[in-house]
Image (cartoon, rainbow, N blue to C red):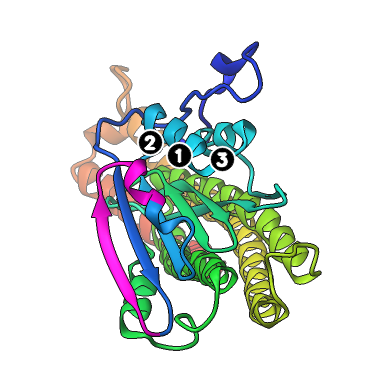
Amino acid sequence: MFVKRASKKAGLAPGTLMYLGEKREAKVKIKIMDYDQHHLEEKEVGSVQECLPFQHTDTVSWINITGIHDMETIRALGERFNLHPLLLEDVVNTEQRPKIDDFEDYLFVVMKMIYPARYEHSVTHEQISLILGSKTVITLQEFEEDFFEPLRERIRKGKGRIRSLGTDYLAYALIDITVDNYFHLLEETGEQIETLQERILTDPTPAILGEIQDLKREMIYLRKSVWPLREIVNSLIRGEFKLVSEDVILYLRDVYDHTIQVIDNIETYRDMLSSMMDIYLSSVSNRMNEIMKVLTTIATIFIPMTFLAGLYGMNFKYMPELEIKWAYPAFWLVIVVTFIAMLMWFKRKKWL
């Protein structure tokens, strides 16, 4: 399901913390990476309190929290890092639309991570919240699926510019890896669409119709996630925020191009899925016509045979042909000749 019920928040005061998402019992995990060009410290801590020593360092600190269902952890995060209550409310509301908010001392970005589920023909989606400060980046995830591991590996190995640049470049890298993940999903979706097209032409079963509808829902949700993200990146490019430097804006332009490409692919797949619905209906109709053609041919061939069989099956006492010695073989001869003649006629008319 792509829609969760948010009606239970109706009437509550602004800033009230109430988790809206899948019910979870997993323990919250907090990972920290603190680094600069010559230094790297990576550790997993048990509470938000242990993150405070990294708050005022001269290095870049990336705090990743997995599990936003624990209100105590979210409340402690707000108190220790002086985060606005409305920001915390948006973090635990997993139906939040992708957006960006400027709180002067930090930026708050909401994104959607969408990836294939463990079972076939389904996707999983989760909300990614990103808080960009001058020396600290905080990310909050719903699930333990860690798609940021390639970025951690880049930090560990010191590849590229990430160790020499600030928190704004780290935020760019997180947004970039989120957008790149859309490409992986679209590649798998494209393969599913090609498979469905072949099945529609060869065996258009009702199950295919359900798969088409599922893919259309996925494309709608993906479009709702990427369009706002494009506006987020565009606002970062325009230089509206003091926490984003000119050097990073150059890289954000590349992410913007990727979001445009993702949107183009989504629109293409949506058109293909819509046309596949028409192809499915046409295939079903053509298949039904072929079936009706065969049944009509069989019925037409047997009409004269049925007439003759019914005629000589009447219980009249005086029927002249019944007394003839060769009447029975003659009857079958007429039946066979009629059958062959009608088959040849249908074939000549190209009805068979």
Mark 1, other Cα within 10 Å: few <14 / some 14–19 / many ≥20: many
Give the spatial CA distance, label 2 vs label 3.
Answer: 91 Å
State if disc 3 and disc 1 touch (CB < 8 Å): no
Give amino acid for label 2.
Thr
Give the spatial CA distance, label 1 vs label 3.
Answer: 8 Å
Give the spatial CA distance, label 2 vs label 1.
Answer: 86 Å
Mark 3, other Cα within 10 Å: few <14 / some 14–19 / many ≥20: few
The residue drawn where x is 34% and y is 59% is 32
- In the picture, measured across the screen, residue 90 lies left or right of residue 105, that is left
Q: Is residue 48 inside the magenta stretch? A: yes
Q: Residue furthest top?
A: 11
State the residue position of label 2.
Answer: 306
Find the magenta span and give its range.
38-52
**Residue 298 image offset from top left, x and y in percent:** 40, 47
State the residue position of label 1.
Answer: 77
Q: Up-down: is 178 above or below 95?
A: below
